Image (tube, helix red, strand yellow):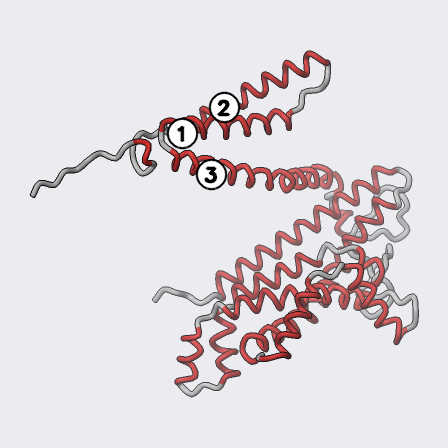
Amino acid sequence: MTLTIRPVSAGSGLAGNRLPRGSAWLSLGASLALSFALFGLLAAADGSPFNLTGAILIGAILHLVVSTGISAAVEGHRQAIDRLVTGLVTGAFLLAMVPLVSVSITVVANGLARFDAEFFNSSMRNVTGEGGGALHAMVGTLLITLAATIISVPLGLLTSIYLVEYGRGRIAKIITFLVDVMTGIPSIVAGLFAYAVFALFLGPGVRMGIVGAVSLSVLMIPVVVRSSEEMLRLVPNELREASYALGVPKWLTIVKVVLPTSIAGITTGVVLAIARVIGETAPLLITAGFTASMNYNLFHDRMQSLPVFVYTQFANQGNPAFAFLERAWAAALVLILIVMALNLIARMVARYFSPKTGR
């Protein structure tokens, strides 16, 4: 019996001719050069400014068309489709990164002007023009967010444990439905709810830090519930069954087995919930108000926060206007840095407290 091996044709898409490694970059460079030249000629013809965004967009589209066509002719249909999809995915990623990079560069460039010692160790009390700082807003943001986290995490985590480990039937379905509804409520509604609840007991016009913390907790709880629920469901049932087989009660199995196994994902969900609310402005305008003085007491008088500080500096510009804008940009930069610090803390917790898979 003779075994004959036949070469696979290039058009099959499984094997055959291949384009050189640098062909994609060559196609991209040529497409961008042609697009830049075309837009340059159009700008010179009618005297309009050069459209950089349009040139890059047309160059990218031309690159996709050219590279896909050449790949189809040389490598076959499958490789051409693969190159097209790869280009679309890469382009979508770069397009999504444009606003993020643009916002980051803008905030850093404008916020560094007031990133000085005075900004971090003074408030706006008795300051009407240049100078002053946002210490009172930083303290208010940390206190309000900390109080909201203390309220939200136990409630959200216990709710998710109930839904995964105990919840059955109609009650669990109702809770799940209500959590899904709460996930989509506007932040202003959460602020109005918290204000209305406290106004019933303390009278209209109440403005306190704890009221703002309650409004933020209304927004945090559904995020914590949904993220923690998904992490708890990822814990293998074999771990639970092994614990039950050793005679460990269910509550102790949850505390000693289920929660430590999913602690990394739960921590990530909590950080996402904090990032969801730390930049909220509308509910805190209604519930906590704004002030120019320091306030360390969540249960007494108005309390400033960084988002509200940014809003008030932009909305109520005085003389000179640049001083108010510089303080607003600096506060926005501080807010971004706080969110970055929270993400770093979450990564450290996930690294050191997640279960180790190695022996």
Helix or strand or loop: what does disc 2 sit on?
A: helix
Amino acid beneath label 2? Gly
Label 1 CA crowd tier, 10 Å (few <14, some 14–19, many 20+)? many
Residue denoted by label 1: 71
Q: CA distance from mark 3 to mark 1?
A: 13 Å
Residue lying at the far front of the rendered structure: 1
Residue lying at the far top of the rendered structure: 45
Q: Earlier in the sequence, mark 3 or mark 1?
A: 1
Residue denoted by label 3: 86
Which residue shows up at 33% across the image and 30% down it? 18
Q: Earlier in the sequence, mark 1 or mark 2?
A: 2
| Quadrant where the C terminus is found in the figure | bottom left
The percent coordinates of residue 259 (x first, y second) are: 52, 73
- Please say whether residue 297 is visible from this viewpoint: no
The circle drawn on residue 29 is: 2
Label 2 CA crowd tier, 10 Å (few <14, some 14–19, many 20+)? some
Which sits in the foreground, 264 or 231? 231
**Relative height, residue 101 to residue 282 (above, below):** above
